[in-house]
Amino acid sequence: MPSAKTKLSKENSSIVPEDFYELKVVSDPRISPGGSTIAYVQQEPDYENNSYKSAIWLVTTAGDEPQKFTIGEKQDHSPRWAPNGNKLAFVSTRNGKPQIYLIDAYGGEAVQLTRMLNGAYNPVWSPDSTKLLFLSDTNAEERQTENESKNGSAKLDAAAKKRLDEERKKKEEEKADPRVITRFIYRTGTSYLDDRQTHIYLLDLNDKERKPTRLTDGEFDYVAPAWEPDGKTLLASVRRVGDTDNNTIVDIVRLSIKGGKPQLVVRTTGGGVEAKPSPYGKHIAYVMTPEKRSSAQNSYLMVLPAKGGTPRNLTEKLDRSVNSPAWSHDSKSIYFLCADRGEQSIWNVTLVDDKIEKLVGNNRSIQALDVSNTSLLAYMLASPTTPSDIFTARSDGSQEKRLTHINKEFLAKKKVAPVEEIWYESFDGVKIHGWLFKPADFDPKKKYPLAVEIHGGPHVMWSPSERTMWHEWQTFASAGYVVFASNPRGSDGYGYKFKDAIHLNWGTEDSQDMLLGVDEVVKRGYIDTKKMVITGGSYGGFMTAWIIGHDNRFAAAFSQRGVYNLTSFYGCSDATLLIEWEFDAFPWDKPELLWKHSPIAYVKNIKTPLFIKHGDLDFRAPINTAEELYIALKKLGREVVFVRYPREGHELSRSGEPKHRVDRLTRMLDWFDSHIGRKKQKKNK
């Protein structure tokens, strides 16, 4: 049950940190064959268990009331319709590890299809609705056991299976005591990588035993399986060139469901490469990111003949990054999502003439897209007034319809801050884009504190519809702050030249872009310049510390999951290549360059009271550089607080434990309030 404090927040029209427990989010909309119904995932915090629960919901495209379709006591997700429309496959953790389940399209009890030792995920239906592909992680020993079982030499009774499970558990514990490291990247997320690889399995639903067959083998990760229209072959992505941790080379391969060696279709580069066969089977689409200095490159939509040939870049002239390609039902065009000037919108490109057109946008953020076999578009959309909902539109982007209002009751009792878009000139005349979130009862004749928010990346972008920031920005506005967020040079969405402008130059021109934005807001006359605060996460944490090492205008700073020493960051992060791409250097070759662009190099100049927040298991921006900054400031006698969150990684603010997410936001608000004179500083425990 929610705490007493949470219950009190329900009586308050202001948005407060504890309101997080009331907010729901939707994702992964999937249209049924024929386009009558959309299955989607609805997630909400589970206060009692300090976790999340999600269920599959259904809503008709006619706009009927949404209906909860699965139990959702734990995590039900990844809904996938059978092409004949009779069944829905999904993934659930209801019995422990994630497994594939099957449920009738008209409801009833779900049937567990897989019982994989290490779980199963990513179900993909065959065109004739009789088979499923899925992914599962295995090591060489487990694959050998599978082979022996397949050959009939490993039939285990219950007692033998229990004994084997106990032996396996003991072996897993011994692997980490001591932990032997041989990989270039050996930890990510919040855990260390093991000796398992991702492989593709085939499950024939007409087989009485329903025993999966593994289609891939070897010490490689096979991901993103996609059926070709003939139902006899599939495409997948695999990284198998050189040290796969130290490059971005990806092979798209073709596999037969009868087995055999993978056949190379095309070699490309990028992260998250997924092959998308056209409905008629003549072409394959995928997204490619150039390997050279990949972090600042645009991602392009590519297409090539299914039989092989030279890939064609369909979006090169767009000068934007694209993602999530989806074919039209007639194979004549491809829909995709595109980051453009603070919005992520739906675009389309036609194969016959490479005509590119934006279909759905309007200053909103679309985070998921599905296209039906009639080219009806379904998508998850976030806007400044709502965190996320499911929408549809016709194939040309017309007749947009909102199908869900999942936070309707919550929003009805809250005052939502209005948003103002601004453009301003930086020091060299470059136009910079930003937004202001003002208190709901804003009066331009009054003076307000200013909260500056800095995005991470660095090559991402803020959007006024940023779903993951909606609650935070609205909380600050409700507390009486004007919130300023901008996209300085280095941000995505404004073209390659703008995105690459901070190459070899972190912290200099981009910080000026932000501070000149602060000056622009101050000129408007309603900001109390003695009550300005600053925060950011990841690259935004880097930038927060950088700015207060070069500028003393802020009353307080709150730096989150930041990188403060680029030399020591290089060897500790799972994103080591970032330094090579951004600075064309290794620490041992150009230590003076990386030190020059490290916030800790300017620690003596930091006079602003600083709160440092970090997750103990952050392997993207490891905690060691936060420790360095904290100890340096303590040694210098500066005002600094360091809070570490156990069990948390780089994604605390987006997917961490609910109580930690509320605690983080509460501490941030308390820290800022105490330093602008609103109340006495609370003791940070």
Image (spheres, rainbow, N blue to C red):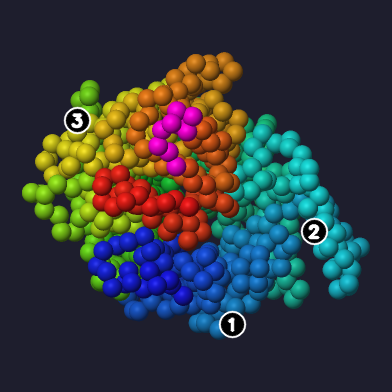
Frontmost residue, 103 versus 539: 539
Q: Do the residues labelled 3 and 2 touch (CB within 8 Å)?
A: no
Task: Classify 10 Å Cα crowding around label 2: few (below 14), some (14-19), many (20 and above).
Answer: few
Residue ID for mark 2: 169
CA separation in Å, label 1 and label 2: 32 Å
Q: Is residue 635 magenta?
A: yes
* Secondary-structure class at tag 3: strand
Residue at screen point 12% across, 40% down: 524
Residue ID for mark 1: 109
Marks 1 and 2, the one that precedes in the sequence: 1
Q: Horizontally, is 411 left or right of 639 in the view?
A: left
Q: What residue type is labelled 2?
A: Lys
Q: Does residue 358 sit above or below 160 in this rendering? A: above
Please state the horizontal and vertical placement of residue 345, each as a whole percent of the image.
Answer: 32, 50
Q: Does the magenta stretch include residue 642?
A: no
Residue ID for mark 3: 425
Query: Which residues, given as a range, are shown in magenta?
Result: 633-641
Please state the horizontal and vertical placement of residue 497, each as a whole percent of the image.
Answer: 34, 28
Please state the horizontal and vertical placement of residue 14, each as a whole percent of the image.
Answer: 26, 64
Please state the horizontal and vertical placement of residue 419, each as a whole percent of the image.
Answer: 21, 52
Q: Which amino acid does label 1 sit on?
A: Glu
Q: Does residue 431 sit above or below 42 in this rendering? A: above
Identity of the residue furthest to the right in this view? 153
